Image (cartoon, rainbow, N blue to C red):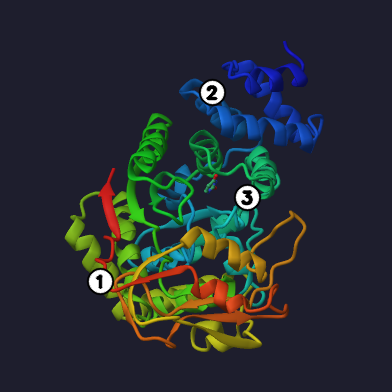
Amino acid sequence: MKSVYEILRAKRDGKELSREEIAFLVAGVVSGEVPDYQAAAFLMAAVIRGLSTPEMAALTEAMRDSGDSWDLSDLAPVVDKHSTGGVGDKATLVLAPLVAAAGGRVGMMSGRGLGHTGGTLDKLAAIPGFRTDLDLPRVRRALTEVGAALFAQTDTVAPADRKLYALRDVTGTVESLGLIVASILSKKLASGTTGIVFDVKTGNGAFLKTVPESRALGRALVDTSRAAGREASGWITDMSRPLGRAVGNALEAEESILVLRNEGPPAVRELCLVLGADMLRFAEPALSEPDARRRLEEAFTSGKAAERFAKLVEFQGGDPRVVEDPSILPQPKSRIPAAAPRSGFVRSIQTEKMGFLSIDIGCGRRKREDDIDFAAGFLVEKTVGDRVEKGEPLAILCLGERPAPRPSFERELADLFEIGDEPAAPPALAIEKL
Ligand code: URA
């Protein structure tokens, strides 16, 4: 067996690593024998050189087997959704109670922010008291009593991903099809859910920015899950603009509540109907797609989805009054408009850059140990295709505890919007079913 040093050199030089070499490396990452700097060197070599299909499969398996695998088969079907990451993507907060209210059982193991994208765990942590550190018995109770559970990876489920995910977040090593597949699937397969819907983001705010790249990622996720005995489906969805109006943890928690109360932005609602219908049909295979959609719409309009969220929040230690009164979430200390420098039509938004700007004000981490400023974020007032007049806000900069990191930061925010004379057609939301 090669030493870690030799494995790193081999990957650096574009050689294919064997299953044993990858397993050895992953075991060392988890035990601590492979220090962070060697793990980070491997990640960078993997991003630059790419991972072959056998390497990706070996990495997925080694990461999955780095800890416990939960067995939820007695509660099956337990359905799940996983997004490849975006800006303003709060779909998980809506989908878990929505699909549960419509009759499915939903278990979702979620992550913290990664790169320029926000993480579900950080959004949930904005809700006072909400805990995501559930152990298996508690997840099982949530699934039976509430019909939904939203939880973090425990120390013992896919610990290799936990460690590598945190390192990738701060070492510029996120954008790799192989690393994304291994990261997502190691924890999904270990978490015991039986049906998974993948929301593969595409566009300038996604990790993989073109439809062909996103399609390849989606196919790898769906096919590998099916090969591992899970039901799986996938959608390529638009991330060339932020999803909905809110970007930032408490703002996104609030927007999710508005969507659950049937008051939120149509794009978030529509995405949840598309993904939720697939989730519900894993739970009830006899249901047609239009019937699944109708069931979900009814859960929105009857108030059952919002009620279920209150139940879920309460079960997980949070304050359920947040559903009636989202003002109990951390509130911005100031709101500064980012004004349009000219009149015209919004032609595009630099979405990835918006994600990075959101980190600058405290929505995410630059270093693993950084704290989040939950109240901070942006409200996107105009999106692609909208008409805007000079001086009207394109977005609102919401500052929490921290001051703006640079003078005229709101100008940087406004500069992300390309304004032209001709109207631009807004891109389709659900681009392709895999
Ligand atoms: N979500 C994950 O869990 N991992 C990735 O690498 C990207 C998105």
- What residue is drawn where x is 34% and y is 46%? 234
Mark earlier in primary sequence (1, 3): 3
Count every numbered label the image shows and give the total: 3
Quarter of the image with the C terminus in it:
top left
* Mark 1 → mark 2, Cα distance in angstroms: 47 Å
Say the numbered circle drawn on residue 388. none
Camera sees residue 252: no
The x and y percentages for residue 359 are 63, 64
In the image, which is nearer the foreground, mark 2 or mark 3?
A: 2
Whether residue 112 sits left or right of residue 269 in the image: it is right
* Mark 1 → mark 3, Cα distance in angstroms: 47 Å
Residue picked out by circle 2: 55
Q: Secondary structure at mark 2?
A: helix
- What residue is drawn where x is 42% and y is 53%? 81
Q: Secondary structure at mark 3?
A: loop
Residue picked out by circle 1: 422
Residue picked out by circle 3: 153
* Residue type for callout 3: Gln
Quarter of the image with the N terminus in it:
top right
- What residue is drawn where x is 70% and y is 25%? 25
Mark earlier in primary sequence (2, 3): 2
Mark earlier in primary sequence (1, 2): 2
